[in-house]
Image: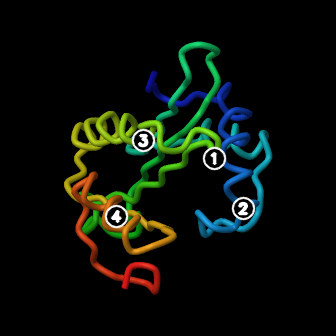
Amino acid sequence: MIRDANPDDAAGIVSVFNPIIEARSLTLFDAPFTVEAERSYIEGLAPRDVFHVAVRATDNVVVGFQSMAPFATYTHAFDHVGVIGTYVDLRSRRQGIAKRLFPATFEAARRKGYEKIFTYSWVQSRRECVRFVSIRRFTVLLRGSAAQ
């Protein structure tokens, strides 16, 4: 089930996010988050922010999340541009969780006036990069060593 995140999801989000950070291979984040910090972040979401969680129906456990925020708040020139991050529990990868998160986030983004979305993708191989961007209809604007 995909739904809006709420402060009570903080522990579940951190339980997904911190192992990804500790793996040091799927994100640029390098320090773990506390439940309190995550709760505070969710409580402080701005009206144009989008934050969804994927919750496993059988036990109501958070298995993924996706957040989107304005690309730049210092100018209105980028009001139509957002930055998105997607994270799936390491034990639940390749089960279509991200694939279910994207439509919900894209729809919320449209309602909030976004027209373009940037993402920073940390992928292991060129094949994974091509798969990631083609499934989600992203266009590669800048390539690092894994995508070349």
Q: Position of residue 87 (x, y in %)?
A: 54, 48
Q: Name the residue under label 1.
A: 90
Q: Distance between the residues labelled 3 and 4?
A: 14 Å
Question: Total marks drawn?
Answer: 4
Q: Name the residue under label 2.
A: 23
Depth check, mark 2 against mark 3: the one in front is: 2
Say left or right for 54 vs 109. right
Q: Earlier in the sequence, mark 2 or mark 1?
A: 2
Which mark, by number, is residue 50?
Answer: 3
Q: Earlier in the sequence, mark 4 or mark 1?
A: 1
Q: What residue type is labelled 3?
A: Val
Depth check, mark 4 against mark 1: the one in front is: 1
Q: Residue 138's image quarter? A: bottom left
Number of residues whose C-alpha sits closer than 10 Å to that of mark 3, classed few (under 14), some (14–19) or many (20 or more): many
Q: Distance between the residues labelled 2 and 3?
A: 26 Å
Question: Is any atom of residue 72 visible in this view?
Answer: no
